Amino acid sequence: MKEVMRNFRAWEQIVTLLLVWVVLFMMSSCSDDGGKEEEAVQVVPPTLNPVSGITQESFSLSWNKVSGADNYLVEVATDEAFDNLVSSYDPWTAYGVLLDVDGLTLNTPYFARMRTVVGEEISAYSNVVMATTLDEEGPEPETALKEVATTFSVGMAVQTSRLTGDYLTILTKEFDQITAEWEMKMSVMYPSSAGYDFTRADELVEFAETNGLEIHGHSLIWHNSTPAWVEDFAGTDAEFEAMVKDYIITTVTRYKGKIKSWDVVNEAFEDGSGSLRNSVFRQKMGDDYIEKCYKWTREADPDVLIFYNDYNMTTDASKLGSTIDMAEDFIARDVPIDGIGFQMHISYNGPDRATIESAAKKVTDTGLMLHFSELDIRANPNNDMSELTVQRAVDLQEKYKEVVEIYNAIPEESKFALTVWGLRDQDTWLIDFWGHQDWPLMYNNDFSVKKAHTGFLEGLE
């Protein structure tokens, strides 16, 4: 019996030890599983959308919903380092995915960021968004652009049919240079093989001389303004080249000492590839037709400034690269060229500052002048508005400011002019081209000044 009891106690001890081991194992397993579960749950920050609904005292924030979030901690500051937090938002606990940030000071830049809260866990910070509250209601400042831009000319594209009334008053007040929008293109000045017609070009030159304005001639050779008789030229290639030479020398000589600069060739490179456009001029005169045209221009007027002009120069790397290669080749071989024109038909939301600055530097590094030659900024590139909103007007103001800041910061020796492509919104070519409403210029249709004009002035500060 004693032996049985001893065996029983031994088995009891073994069972007890086994039970303890099982309990410890289960606890360890639970602990491990819990650690894995804890490690798997990472609290992520939300992504803030661009600010909307900006007023004098408020703006609206929105963000994506983070799964499992209890709430969000929103911080708003007056500096990008968030050293000066707005007391009400230090931080503010927000629920949902929308927040109206109010109680702010007018005409002040604000920065916002946020974190996600899940239980006792808090995420890292989100991206930072920025908004500037609106200024006091009232008229925009009407300071003349040319009075503030002291290191380069401020130009505007004009048509002779518009040179009257308020248009004339604003033009002569604001600008010190004009570009012929149509009057100095080949299709206008050389409409038929019967001879030249300088009527409209002469009218524009006389107007400029009367009003003390510089003239930038635009443009002697452009595939889209080539008369039909030139496209269908019946003579030999040698006769074609002689005709083009006579046209350039006749035109440039006529306005020698009156026109400061010419876009001699416009838009000669293809989009995307940077190869020479297969225009009638290239077909008849060869790949060196640009060089020939530039030499003839210099022969006719030794003092006139010679430019090459094209679009998408900030976003089409191949086109810009081909332009720079051509320019550097011309410089190395003493082929006359003085500057490059960026047309700058852009949008309120792009290209960004860094992209424009990078492209501009490629030109200024050559030692040539840079002309922002046809500036307009689309406010409605996605056709998402039927009228210009306050928010989009502010966006346009900021983009005009940015573009002018970029141009104003280039080396002094590279500055020539910053030219806007029209006065009032209704004058823009963009509405017909894109087939919907837009407001890309600095004056409303009633000749009242827009926030875009204020942005231009701010860019000169």
Image (cartoon, grey):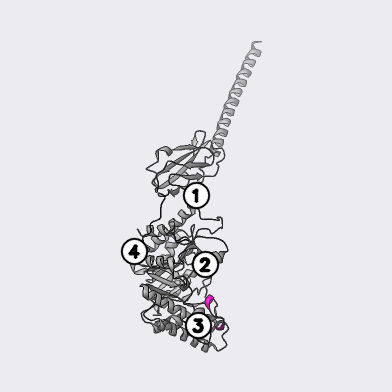
Q: How packed is label 4: few (under 14 Cα within 10 Å), some, or many (20 or more)? A: few
Q: Is residue 224 magenta?
A: yes
Q: Amino acid at mark 4?
A: Glu
Instruction: Give the mark nearest the N terminus, 4 or 3.
Output: 4
Q: Position of residue 297 (x, y in %)?
A: 42, 81
Front residue of 381/93: it is 381
User: In the rendered image, which residue does mark 4 sit on?
Assistant: 147
Q: Which amino acid type is marked by label 3? A: Tyr
Q: Nearer the viewer, residue 340 or 12?
A: 340
The dot on residue 50 is: 1
Decide which of tag 1 and tag 4 comes sooner along the chain.
1
Location of residue 146 in the rendering, given as x and y in whole percent from the top left corner: 36, 65
> Is there CB contact under 8 Å for labels 4 and 3?
no
Which label's residue is closer to the chain start, 3 or 1? 1
Q: CA distance from mark 4 to mark 2?
A: 28 Å
List the single residue furthest toward the top.
Answer: 1
Q: Residues within 10 Å of mark 2 (few under 14, many from 20)?
A: few
| Amino acid identity at mark 1 | Pro
Residue that carries the numbered disc 2 in the rendered image: 429
Q: Quadrant of the C terminus?
A: bottom left
